[in-house]
Amino acid sequence: MKKLLVIGSVNMDIVSGVKQFPLPGETIDSISLSYFPGGKGANQAVAAARSGANCYMIGAVGNDGFADKLTHELARSGVRVDHVLRKQGASGIAIITVNEEGENNIVIAKGSNSKLTSADIDEHVHWEAVYAVLLQNEISWDTTKYVIEQAKTASVAVWLNPAPAVSIPQTLWSSIDTFIMNETETAVITGIQVDNEQSALQAAMLLIAKGVKRVIITLGEHGCVYADVQGEQYSIPAIKVKAVDTTAAGDTFIGAFAAASFAGEGTKQALVYAVAASALAVTKAGAQSSIPTREEVISFIGMNKLV
């Protein structure tokens, strides 16, 4: 049975709760401190696995005290971790500050994530067993670019979440099947400030003109916008919930959408499922600890009469 392959970051998130974010030069007291397994790659893999995808991951942890915890939590969620590699030095760290409204600021120390190489990809990826590869930008861009090129050669679908946003060479656009980003990343990549559905669709169509097959722009509390090369377009509203921590909302959306899509759901239904999953995620603290299961999402959709 073919698998969804996630290649990306594995981090330990060190989360500090504050009443409000500090001003430049200001020192404030934290009101809480927690450690949560995270990393965009790992979060998306967990979200996909908890929503039923047959998922395995290639990433790197260090040889520090966080490594075992990070791999254990992935495996506990159903992600295959045979190819999560050990590298000398520290595991990746995300230093996250969360305010009382659930908004966050994040600083990444890549650690072992920066040591995942194209040689590792050649050794550990068997493309004939993969139906799609899901990528982000928290590992070396050279490695990500190499994966995109190899996947295209192997006729494997490429899903890219350009977070953090980077400049993408023109030669790669046509190799990307699904491009998922938020408003901030959209502004960096397209130069279009997204503040409503119309501007989001404008940005999406710009990327489709460059060769991307379909684009999703997530809009936080305003849901998401979808457009593809066939001319299909959707705008899916968000579900109003009390936000506790938005840290893994985008990753949950992506992993859940991938799982629903590859399970045979139609695009609109998969988007509704992903919006519901991300809404549930922001009601709990932490990254992977907040990601819901398929059963929880289906129940939530039913309670909110979304189908």
Image (cartoon, helix red, strand yellow):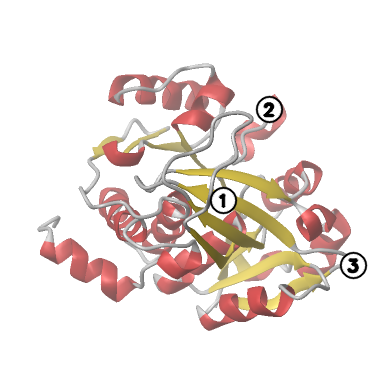
Q: Quadrant of the C terminus?
A: bottom left
Marks 3/1 in contact by CB < 8 Å: the verdict is no
Q: Up-down: is 227 above or below 93?
A: above
What percent of the width, then of the height, locates residue 249? 41, 52
How packed mark 2 is, by other alpha carbons closer than 10 Å (few <14, some 14-19, many 20 or more), is: few
Q: Which residue occupies 34% across, 45% down?
A: 101
Which residue was labeled with disc 2? Answer: 167
Per the image, label 3 sits on a secondary structure element best described as: loop
Which residue was labeled with disc 3? Answer: 88
Among the two numbered marks 2 and 3 on one chain, the one whose residue lies closer to the N terminus: 3
The Cα atoms of the two marked residues, 3 and 1, are separated by 24 Å
What percent of the width, then of the height, locates residue 71? 66, 76
How packed mark 3 is, by other alpha carbons closer than 10 Å (few <14, some 14-19, many 20 or more), is: few
**Disc 2 vs disc 3: which is toward the camera?**
3
The Cα atoms of the two marked residues, 2 and 1, are separated by 25 Å
Per the image, label 1 sits on a secondary structure element best described as: strand
Q: Which residue occupies 39% across, 19% down?
A: 202
Q: Which mark is residue 13?
A: none
Q: Quadrant of the N terminus?
A: bottom right
What percent of the width, then of the height, locates residue 259? 42, 64
The Cα atoms of the two marked residues, 2 and 3, are separated by 29 Å
Q: Up-down: is 237 above or below 246?
A: above
Among the two numbered marks 2 and 1 on one chain, the one whose residue lies closer to the N terminus: 1
What amino acid is labelled 2 in the image? Ser
Marks 2/1 in contact by CB < 8 Å: the verdict is no
Q: Which mark is residue 96?
A: 1
Q: Up-down: is 107 above or below 183?
A: below
